[in-house]
Image: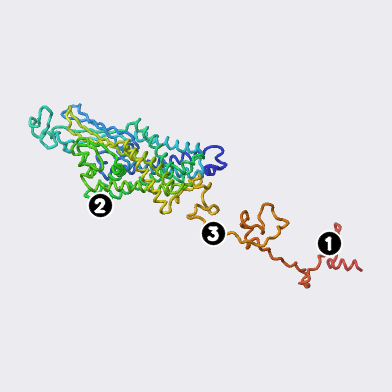
Amino acid sequence: MSTASTATGSAGPGRATGLPWADVVMSAVAAVSWALIGMAGTAALGLRLLDADTAASPGPTAAAVVALAVGGSVTPTGDVSMFGLSGAQADTAVDVMPLGVGLVGALLLSLVFLRSLRVAGVVVSGRELAARAGTVVALAVATAGGLVWAGHDVITVDVAALGVAGLPGADGGGGLDVPGLGDIGELLPDRVGDLVDAEVTVGFSVDTAPTLLAGLFWSAGVLLVALLASRRTPLPRGWDALHRVVRPVASSVVAVLLVTVAAGIAAAGYAAAGDDHPRRIAGAALLGAPNGVWLGVSVGLFVPWDAQGDGALLGALPHPLDELLRTGTREPVTLGALAGLDGRVWLLGAGAATAVLLAGVLTGVRTPLGGAPGAGGFAGRCAVRLGAATAVTLPVLVWLTEVSVGASLSMLGYDAFDAGLDLNGRLGAAALLGAVWGAGAGAAGALLAWACGVAGTRVAALARGAGGDGSSAPSGPYRPGLPYRPPDPDTNPYLRLPGPRTEQAAPEDAVPGRSTLADTGAGADDVAAAPTVAGLAPPSRPPRPDRGRLWPDRVPPPPPPPSAPRPPGAREPEGGDEGARGSGGR
């Protein structure tokens, strides 16, 4: 059997000998490769739009951004050399995930992986599912190792050209304020900044162990979410509960999250159209649109945050969050506090509530009815399921959008440059609020879907086959789906029972247990009881006439008798058979 035939069909004879390892490995390579290409391209394009690739090589910088996107760790290091002295160190820390890059890679990885499972067959075995997922995770970890190898670079920055306050050459005069001594710039000769070799060497490198571990968990988490949210991907036998319970609500939540990201990108495009620097807005949206959107969703759902920021990093925050953190102290970030600075922030709460309600409607449309006791029972079922899903999803979103960035460029204990940003959400409150919002939106969405008559109308085929609506297989031409209204004999002539007819004796060749023409009422076979099918006997045909009586002139003559065999060597008589017969007669 060929490799192609072995790789197709989950229950085919080719799979009896083992797993199609060639197909498993090739699909895993395709999934990880497309994910890496998408993330690297997104990171490179975003850095190019932000003009961040001018100070360093674009390749190592993009690799570092991809490592951060999967949850890895990047350690910047620096060394300041002034007056020939060494000992000034730059202590920096970066803990932020560019979710725009990570979302592109997650979508590509999950799409290719799910497609390989759908091609495998209607039902995939647990062994094959584990083999395919394990191969993808192993290749993802190996790819993270490649990011560690490529994500390092060194940048030399001219401090005088940057004009950093507090360093010689920043203003051309050599002013330097040292704690305890005051401004000692006047003690230095004029134009000393032109003679001082002031250079800041800043490097960065991707940490090995944290990045490899992050690649492992990131790829496994993406595959888990993809399997839970894909309603048309086969699963092993015995996992029917996932089809009818988990997948409808998981797919609804994931769909709403993607819709919110699309709305954020559209809003960024609208803002870039009227801004003086549209490239910066486009680059920031490309790298971190999910960060800002999901942060806004959590704030709109009244999740409390704690934030503190100072320095130049405040300019990267949206309004009015940057204005709230101008004090430099740790401030609580809530919807009310932001709305006190800008009343339009209340629209953020309305948008977040609408998104959760949309998830509830999708849950009601995709959840099988399954004999639910009316609208109340169906709404309760959807409320419990969506509440549990949002109780897990909202804390995860808060954890992903947390930001911790600090930079301190010091020389001999003097902080020449200090900037930081710390934004953390409260995970416990997020879980509680997620459960409350999900339960309310699930009940409201299910009742709305029930009132509109669309409850359970978008159930996936695998959920129907799992017994979600009482059937054992997907609907089709020989198995009708769930009707939109109860059957009514007054409007459907095929549901009317035939009227009474004259009783007739059962024929001699009647099959025992099968209805006859005399059977009426319950238990009668519909086809046999129909008067237009079995009630009319076929017309009798006349006997077939003799062909000789109809066409006497066309009766063929009888064939001649076979001639006797001639002995060997005998000559054929002249005149043929007639001559032979004539001579014999004479």
In this rendering, the answer to whether 188 lies above or below 336 is above
- Residues packed near mark 3 inside 10 Å, few (<14), some (14 to 19) or many (20 plus): few
Residue at point 22% right, 50% down? 275
Is 108 placed left or right of 415 in the picture?
Answer: right
Element marked by disc 3: loop
Residue that label 2 marks: 273
Q: Which of marks 1 and 2 precedes in the sequence?
A: 2
- What colouring method underlies this structural image? rainbow
Separation of residues labelled 3 and 1 (CA atoms): 75 Å
Task: Say few, some or many: other residues with alpha carbon within 10 Å of mark 1 (under 14 / 14 to 19 / 20 or more).
Answer: few
Q: Please state if 19 lies on the left or on the right of 498 as rendered.
A: left
Q: Which mark is residue 368?
A: none
Mark toward the start of the polypeptide (3 vs 1)? 3
First along the sequence among labels 2 and 3: 2
Amino acid at the residue labelled 2: Ala
Q: Residue at horizontal 18%, vertical 29%?
A: 411
Callout 3 amino acid: Pro
| Residue 39 picture location, percent across and down | 35, 42
Single out the residue that lies furthest toward the right. Answer: 586
Q: In front: mark 2 or mark 1?
A: 2
Count of marks, rendered view:
3
Residue at label 1?
A: 562
Q: Amino acid at mark 1?
A: Pro
The answer to whether residue 415 is seen in the rendering is: yes
- Labels 2 and 3 touching (C-beta < 8 A): no
Q: Secondary structure at mark 2?
A: helix
Instruction: Quadrant for the N terminus, please.
Output: top right
Q: Check disc 3 and report the residue beneath it.
A: 489
Query: Which secondary structure lies at badge 1?
Result: loop
